[in-house]
Amino acid sequence: MPSALPITFPSGGVRPRARAARFFLQTGTLVAAAIPILLGTIPGYGLSPEDVLTVRVTAEVEGSGPTARQMAVDRAELTAMEELIRSWVPETDLEPFRGLMRHVRAYVKQTDVLRTTRDGNLFRLEADVTFRELPLRRDLAAALLPRLPQKPALVLIARPTVQDHSTGETIPGRVINPAIRRLAETLEQLGFSVHVPELDGRLTAQSIETAFQGGVEQVGTMARQLDQTFLLACEGSVNSRPVQPQANVLRVEATFNARLFRCEDGKMLESLGITSILQSVEITEGARLALEDAATKLTTDCVSALILAAAALRTAEPDAALIIIEQPPDADTVESLAAVLRELPETVTAEVLASGPVLGRIRVRTALHMAELADLLQQTEVGPYRLELKKAVGRDIQLQIVPR
């Protein structure tokens, strides 16, 4: 059977801005499993490498002596956990997660008291609280999942080619396909809407390969042209060598990586990866099986990242509306519409996020209610075009530009 080989990755993607706390990221690997949670019931679940996060906080309590010190440590750990949760999901009401926070010690790796002071009957303490990040992320995601208004829709793409870095050759066939099918099936079982654009012809294998070759920025550009909420971009790589100098059995080490992008602005939110190792007499079959095993084990962390990203959508700009333009005739038309919006007295900002041939996106901060903004857009003309409202849901307005 394939077995996962934990490897250590640095910080997974772009983290939300820390608020009251300062964060000091280290990397570590633990062998202990997390507390059983909903996401841990996924078939084939396996632990990924575990990061730790350190939060510096202060706490004060009334009293003196060992009892007051322990009470201050307990308060510091709880405060640090609250700050960490709010850094992942800003403006979240923490009340539904009080049960989770009652088990704060399950997530704390260590607490280092830096200094203590006394002021009358007040005992103050400053400490660095170090958390086991992945168990906390997974349990928080499990608690958030039933509270999401709706599961986010996502696009799943995979780099068509898989390189064997030990030989420098491309492994023939789409050996990553079974891994992608397994990942998509599990996400759909959990209620996510998964779109594979290669199947409906919206994206070609060549365009996907070109985007991966261009790096994160190019994949982000592709994400902005998609009409779903998130893009999960996956790729695999392999290193193979004989188990013995003259043996015909290969040791196949396959790494499966997944990057999560927000389609609204093409920003990469998370970067995840895991490696599996097996032995095989044939490189193609070995790579296929090892990548599928790695994808299975990474699914839990992909789900956690999706849930946290969905819960954090637009918390930084709760008054922002997103205007989506289907198949704009050109970039100038999208910019002209943004210019019209900027002239409105109620508009704070109007930013063009994308202006490609498939989709245009404009993020608007305005004092107008959504119904007022939708009515106004329907009456707006841009050059030789008028706007036709397709749908308005929440703070998203979808338009089509048609000739007058």
Image (spheres, rainbow, N blue to C red):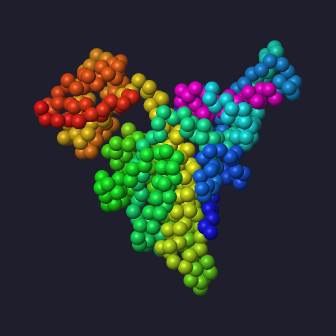
The picture places residue 400, in percent across and down from the top left corner, at: 23, 36
Q: Which residues are magenta?
A: 70-94
Residue at 85% across / 21% down in the picture?
64
Q: Residue 77: say if magenta.
A: yes
Residue at 31% across / 58% down in the picture?
204
Above or below, comparing residue 270 to residue 85 in the picture: below
Instruction: Name the side, left or right, on which 354 lies relative to 100.
Output: left
Magenta stretch, main secondary structure, is helix
Q: Residue 50: say if magenta.
A: no
Residue 188 in view in this figure: yes
The picture places residue 183, in percent across and down from the top left corner, at: 50, 55
The picture places residue 364, in percent across and down from the top left corner, at: 34, 27
Query: Could you say which quadrant of the image residue 388 lies in?
Result: top left
Above or below, comparing residue 245 to residue 325 in the picture: below
Residue at 25% across / 31% down in the picture?
389
Please state which of residues 187 and 211 is positioned toward the viewer in this rendering.
187
Residue 8 in view in this figure: no
